[in-house]
Amino acid sequence: MNQSIKPLNVLIKGLILFLLFNLVIAACQPRVGQFSLYNALFRGRERLPFGENPRQSYNLSLFNLDAMFASHIIDGAPKADDEFRVIIIGDSSVWGTLLKPEETLAGQLNEASLNACGKNVRAYNLGYPTIALTKDVMMLSYGMGYDPDLVIWMTTLDAFPLEKQTSTPLVANNEETVRGLATSYQLRVEADDPNFEKKSFWEKTFVGDRRSWADIIRLQIYGVMWSAAGIDQFYPAEYEKAQTDFEADESYHELTSPLNEDALALNALEAGFNVAGETPMLLVNEPMLISSGANSDIRYNFFYPRWAYDEYREMMTALSQANGWTYVDLWDAIPANEFTNSAIHLTPAGEKLLAENLAPYIFENCK
């Protein structure tokens, strides 16, 4: 005997199942970002997802670290016996603003076909376009899961001010990861830091967190275009060159001379070396534009007055010597004409020169 379908009952049961689904999602917080079409249906990205013009760059910014790393080529590259694996962390200069993937520092090192410890050097770009040491430590903690033989940490003074450490959206939206680093590696994080984005139980449900789910899906969709075109950022025909003339202004983040170490995230450096553990790490003070324009006797560039940067360099040298860190200061290694739209963004020729400067240190850091 056939029973007639009662639409109201079907609707009620469907709503109950949907409610249960949302409750399970909120309670379990499954790591769905680990499931990716990259490195399977289409090739992995050469750098981590970041983009403000998805339709032009076939890329977007999101906060799910699992999804970001699952989309990267390193996630689909089993380490070969003859591979000397190098991961590079840092800011937009490492990620490669205005550069094609092969023109970045990682791309240039790979193009050079280097050999270290009797193995072929393969560099992976794990840079991300915000300047903060805490963000770098967070990315390093993920990168260590891919068994690197060497870590290159590119940094600069503007990554150090405490005010910047958790204000970057990627850090602010990954409080659990950052606090885990504080517990395991003594990374300095304030217990009541207001910058962290705290989600209510409702905001952790599928409905409440639908934007995050949508971003993960969109990342997969843009992978089709990335795989076909190899484009992952928008390249403008023209751009404004890095500033070289300045006001007679010596200010820097409301800090005064001498630089107050308590106002800088020096602890993050130690935490980063703790994360790396036994893996050799090369700490590099990245190159910057040194202006010869108006008031260049007061400011090196848009970022730094001379007094602050000079004191920072002295501090970094002293810290590295005291802690036994391998530190390379390449602040003036690249001529001013090889910078693009920022005092830290290099041209392809500048990146090649940087890779040539770093190559000898890679050879010295065999396990």
Image (tube, grey):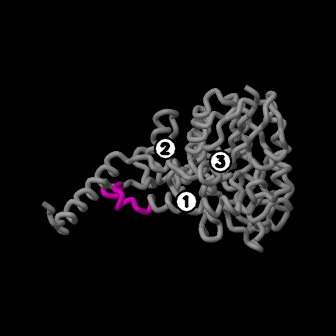
Residue 268 percent across, percent down from the top left = 58, 40
Element type at mark 2: helix
Residue 321 percent across, percent down from the top left = 72, 31
Residue drawn 56% across the image and 39% down it: 141
Residue 95 percent across, percent down from the top left = 68, 54
Report which residue position mark 1 lands on: 219
Q: Quadrant of the N terminus?
A: bottom left
Residue drawn 67% across the image and 64% down it: 233
Q: Is residue 207 above or below residue 282?
A: below
The answer to whether residue 342 of the structure is visible from this angle is: yes
Residue type, numbered disc 1: Leu
Q: Is residue 208 magenta?
A: yes
User: Which label belongs to residue 73?
Assistant: 3
**Label 3 or label 2, whichever comes before in sequence order:** 3
Residue type, numbered disc 3: Ile
Q: Residues within 10 Å of mark 1 (few under 14, many from 20)?
A: many
| Location of residue 152 (image quadrant) | top right
Q: Residues within 10 Å of mark 3 (few under 14, many from 20)?
A: some
User: Which label belongs to residue 13?
Assistant: none
Residue type, numbered disc 2: Val
**Label 2 or label 1, whichever comes before in sequence order:** 2
Asked whether the beta carbons under mark 2 and mark 1 sit within 8 Å of each other, the answer is: no
Provide the residue span drawn in magenta. 202-211
Residue drawn 50% across the image and 47% down it: 34
Element type at mark 3: helix
Residue 311 percent across, percent down from the top left = 71, 46
Element type at mark 1: helix
Report which residue position mark 2 lands on: 178
The answer to whether residue 256 of the structure is visible from this angle is: no
| Location of residue 42 (image quadrant) | bottom right
